[in-house]
Amino acid sequence: MGNEIERIVKEIKDEAPPRSEEEIKRLSEEERNLLLKTGIDILGKNRCGLFFQHDHSVIKCESMVDGVEVMDIEEARKRYGLEEYWWKLIPPDKDIWTKRAAEHQEHGYFIRSFEGAKVTYPVQSCLYLSMDRLAQDVHNIVIAEEGSELHIITGCAAGPHVRSGLHVGISEFYVKKGAKLRFTMIHNWAEEMAVRPRTVVVVEEGGSFESNYICLLPARDLQMYPTAILSGKDAVATFNTVLLAKEGSYMDTGSRVVLKKEGCRAEIISRAVSVGGTIIARGHLVGEAPGVKAHLECKGLLLSPKGVIHAIPELEGRTSDLDMSHEAAVGKIAKEEIEYLMARGLTEQEATSLIVKGFLSIDIEGLPDELKREIDGLISTVEKEGL
């Protein structure tokens, strides 16, 4: 896979023509439907803010409520400086991808919920690539101020005529004392895309962070390993990941939580289905304080002899009086399950499809109903095509 990534990187372009807000109006119905499948309703229903980056241009950036701020990261740095947040959780020399983002950065978003603000609808952010073989390097900062509640839906997508490209996303999240941040990311990339998110979250006392990541469409090479640092007493982090890998896809994903203070809790849950692709499902829990509780669960379904699922659960206890556990299982669909459903009138194909759909389905709290229906429909379409 290394040679394949080298080829993609060599072929990418670092320059893109400027885009304007008029581009949103000119999006085709096919593009609008594609974005809706990533959780982005371009018509503006059920949201409290919108960030839309088209290639290298931020073409829409607005907040619709008083308690939330949505800005181009460049504007935010000019207005606030952001010295205490910028590259503080992720060093720019961490790897070749962070170095690239530091050197080539093309915007990104700044989203902040103000102290005590509790918003009903999510902020929608979209990172959209419409040029083939283009590189998009973004840096995002999210701050949930003390006592606030914020939900962000990020849709990352490539246009219908894009086959390859590179996306590097640096994200630094700050969840202040007693705040709650729910972050839902849905990827819909092209078949030859290389994708490199780099994310670190710090959660202060009594704060809560929930990550939901869904990738059901092919990507040539995906590598991500977000880390949550629970730095305050009674902080909580949850990671939910749903993956489907078709033949030719390589997904090296995982989550890491460091529980540093008494009473911290964490949960890492992943569901992986391979219909010919390779999935490496990592999970790492680090308990550093007494009284912490954490659980890691990885389940995988192999539906093709060409597929690979490699589960790597890790528990690291650095003190006594903690409670951490893990569960990992990889295999095929049980014959008894298929036979049970066939005895009730389903064909073998229908029975298998129903089981896979149930396995991949995830209840994302706070997601608008119409977007839930779109995601459920995407699951149905993808698993039928993949079987």
Image: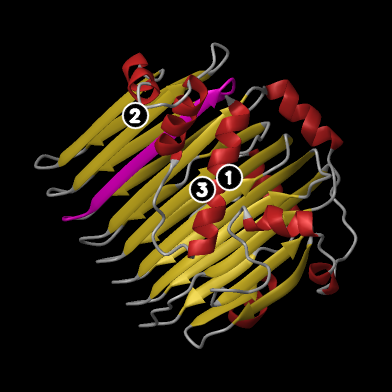
Q: Which quadrant would the N terminus be assigned to in this image? A: top right
Q: Which quadrant would the C terminus be assigned to in this image? A: top right
Residue, disc 1? 378
Q: Earlier in the sequence, mark 2 or mark 3?
A: 2
Which segment did they paint magenta?
262-279
Is residue 82 located in the magenta-colored stretch of the structure?
no
Can residue 89 be seen? yes
Q: In the displayed structure, would residue 263 be above or below residue 320? A: below
- Picture quadrant of residue 380: top right
Q: Nearer the viewer, residue 282 or 269?
A: 269
Secondary structure of residue under mark 3: helix
Secondary structure of residue under mark 1: helix
Tell me the CA gap for discs 3 and 1: 5 Å
Is residue 264 located in the magenta-colored stretch of the structure?
yes
Residue 369 percent coordinates (x, y)? 48, 63
Position of 311 with respect to 317 (left or right) is right
Marks 3 & 1, CB-CB < 8 Å contact? yes
Residue furthest top in the image: 305
Residue, disc 3? 376
Can residue 91 be seen? no
Q: Amino acid at mark 2?
A: Pro
Q: Earlier in the sequence, mark 1 or mark 2?
A: 2
Residue furthest bottom in the image: 66
Secondary structure of residue under mark 2: strand
Residue furthest front in the image: 345
- Which residue shows up at 80% across the image and 38% down it? 163
Residue, disc 2? 313
- Which residue shows up at 40% across the image and 20% down it? 333
- Which residue shows up at 40% across the image and 25% down it? 311
